[in-house]
Structure formats: C-alpha cells, structure tokens
Image (cartoon, rainbow, N blue to C red):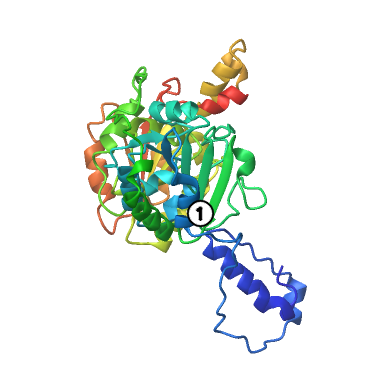
Amino acid sequence: MLDDIESLDEQLAAVWEQLNQSKPVALVLPPDALSEMTSPAFDTDMRVRPRDAVERERPSAFLQHHLSHRRKGRIVVMAGDEAARYPDLPYLTTRLCEVLKAPILWSINGANAVSRNNPYGYGYLGFGGNDRAAELWDDLNEHDLLITIGYCADEYTTNFSPAKAGLVWNITASAYLYGSAHGSFRHQVAGEFQQTVGDVAAILRETILWCQAHPQICNEESPVYPDLNTHAFERARGNAVDIAAFYEKLDGLWQPDSVGFDDVCLAYKDRQYVTQRPHPYAKMYSLYRGSAMGGAYGLGLGAKIASPGKHVFVFSGDGCFRLYGGCLMEARQLGITLFVLDNASYGIVEQGLSKVLPDTPARRYHGELERMDFAAMARACGWLSVRLSPDLSNLSDIMREAYRQDRPSMLVEVPIDSHQIVGPNPRLKNL
C-alpha cells in the first residue's frame, strides 16, 4: 500500500526483493494519498540484496554429512517449477543424472529444466503425467534419497501425497515457495527433510563435482525407458481431430524460440502425456495451480509484448475462450497463434464427472456448450483464421504460417472429441 511517502524507499526495496525471487507484486495507490505526496529526492542507487530465508550451508557439507556413508536405496531427482527459471538447468540436470545414474521426473513447468536427451528421464509427474513417473513416485521408500530442485507439493504434481523417500534434499533459491510452511516442506515429506538455499546452478555444479569424486554413492544402474507410458491412447470418434496424433505431429514441427501456454482445458492435461519429454525448441508453461480458465491468453499476450522476437502459441478450450473472446481485437497485430480446442463442452468436467459420479446422468453435468464459429469471430477482429482438418493434412501449412514474420495473430480451430481420454487425472481420486 503506497500511502506513506516516508516508507516508500523501504517498500520499493521489498518489491525488488520479491521480484528477484520471481514472485509477483501488487502496488495499491490510494487516490487521496497520491494527491498529498511530495517529491523528495530518492536514492536512485538502491543497493538492495535479498535476505536469506534460512541459514545457508555449502552443498559439499550437506553431501559429506548425509551421503559419504551411503546407505542402501536409490537416488532420484525431481525438477520442480522453480527449476524452469534457470537457463543452464537442462544441461546441469542431465549431468547430475549421468553422474548419479539417477532417474529424474518433473512437474509440468519443471520440464523446462530437463533435456529431452536426458537418458534417465521418467516423465511428467501428476496431472497428465507419464506412467513411468507415477510408478517411480509411488515406489519411493524409506531407503531412498530424493533430490528436488524447487520442491513441488501441489495437487497437480504430487496429488497431495507426501514424498515417501527417507531423505528429501531440496535445492532452492527461495525457501518460501508455493506450498511451503515457515520456509520448509518438511510437512510434505514422510521422512527427513533438508534444504540448501542459494544459487541453484552453482549448487548443482558443486554437487556434480562432489559426486564425481565419490562414485560409491551413485546408483548401481537405473532402467532406461524410451517409452514413458504403459497405456495405449484412446482414439477420437467421428469427424474429430485425434488429439494424441495432433500433439505427436505438432511435436515434430516446432522451430527455435517458441513458447507456449496451456489453458485450463484438456490441453493442460493431454499434451504432456503424449509428448512425454520437453522439446528443445518450445518452452511450455501452464498455470495449473490456480486453474484459472482463460488465463493462458493473457500469458501469451504478455510473453509476446515482453519478447517480440519469440513465437508465442496459446492452447485454449472453447469454454476458456468465452472468458477473453471480447479481447481479440486488441491483440490482432501481435502475431500470436491461438489453438482453440472445440468440443462443445467443458471436457475436463465431462471426463471427471463420469468417474466421480458414474451413476449420474450426463445431462446433469451441465458441461455442454453451444457451438460457436471461432474462425468467423477471429476474422471479424482482424485475425487470420483456419480450421484444422481432422486428418491433420493442413497442420504443417498452419505451422509454416505461424512462423511467418510480420503477420496478424492467427486462430486455429481444432475440432476434438471430449470423450477421448488421453492424459490421466489423478486428482479424481480425491473427489
């Protein structure tokens, strides 16, 4: 609350610290206070440094204390959402896994910290997650060590289940992350919890060097799985795009400097199950924790404005579209690409309720939506528009147009089948 000119320096310093930890800030400026403020000379060289949330320990000290006398059990690595902030992480997580022969699993956003070529990748964990990752998480026991890079304890990643490893070591730049309590995730683990706070990349480099010098702590070997799923995809019915085939083909069409956002629809559940591993050319993000329908559109606009050279893609549902459809006009010249998954329903609702309330008639789900001509709306707002063919025959042409410079924004209508279940939804077990 910016209502006291005397405290403004201190408040702006706090803002700097919050933003430096990749956390949001809301500034509230009451009109009365603004009209009474004077204009003092501000110190324009605020040399503020973030305060340490906890006392820091060198990673080598932790490793020497906890790992030098290696007990039986495995070492497993987990890349959480925080890990996606650091550009060197795909290389460093690969090296860590290679040195330790350790399997790695990741959250939806944490995938951006993992290399597709990491041979020890076990996949996305949780909502829309891969079968191998789920098996590994469920198989953790009191003899195992779980190394986490930004622990994820949310409903969509761990489904509120505590990590069953005997020791969880969390590497983080900020102890106060989503789901933490008093700067710790101790309440989210079944065994012991230890944490090192500092420069994440530097901690990982030191850890890799220490582990190279102590090969006796490494896993004997971890199975390598080219295919991270053990279940076959369901196929689409009628004249609809097969969503699994869509994501498989799209995965081969990405070009460098691509960034995408999944909205709260089937897109934020199915993509990761189909593609299994992150793509080196496309960084993909989801606001799954908030489950705010329509939010991906705003993320896409913000990303394009912040980095005009990026190729921005948004994957949204027909239900999500209703929350921002009136704002297409303002984004017509941004050059983003918006895929609208059209199944005339709230697909997540229909798929979920059929499992949660199996004896309730589908007409009581209130999940149906009226059909809408998305392409016509887009053209009326100055956008390019196209409808994806059910056989995907024009997808390559659509992606070529998406990467063309100096074009208007483009909407792609994707007819899909709401009854085609692809990615798993473990959240249903709690409902």
Q: Is residue 84 visible?
A: yes
Q: Determine which quarter of the picture holds residue 189.
A: top right
Residue 378 position within the rendered picture, expressed as x and y whole percent measured from the top left? 41, 45
Q: Is residue 379 visible?
A: no
Q: Is residue 262 left or right of residue 19?
A: left
Q: Is residue 209 left or right of residue 364?
A: left
Q: Quadrant of the C terminus?
A: top right
Name the amino acid, label 1.
Answer: Thr
The residue sitting at the bottom extreme is 41
**Would you name the residue on which mark 1 appears?**
172
The residue sitting at the front extreme is 69
Task: Identify the residue shown where x is 45% and y is 34%.
Answer: 125
Secondary structure beneath disc 1?
strand
In this orientation, which residue lies closer to the viewer: 147 or 284? 147
Residue 268 position within the rendered picture, expressed as x and y whole percent measured from the top left? 45, 36
Task: Identify the residue shown where x is 35% and y is 57%.
Answer: 88
Residue 183 position within the rendered picture, expressed as x and y whole percent measured from the top left? 63, 53
In this orientation, which residue lies closer to the viewer: 255 or 407? 255
Question: Is residue 13 depicted above or below 79 in this figure?
Answer: below
Q: Determine which quarter of the picture holds residue 235.
A: top left
Residue 162 position within the rendered picture, expressed as x and y whole percent measured from the top left? 58, 34
Task: Identify the residue shown where x is 38% and y is 62%.
Answer: 307
In this orientation, which residue lies closer to the viewer: 112 or 66? 66
Q: Quadrant of the N terminus?
A: bottom right
Question: Is residue 198 depicted above or below 346 in this figure?
Answer: below
Q: Is residue 400 left or right of residue 340?
A: left
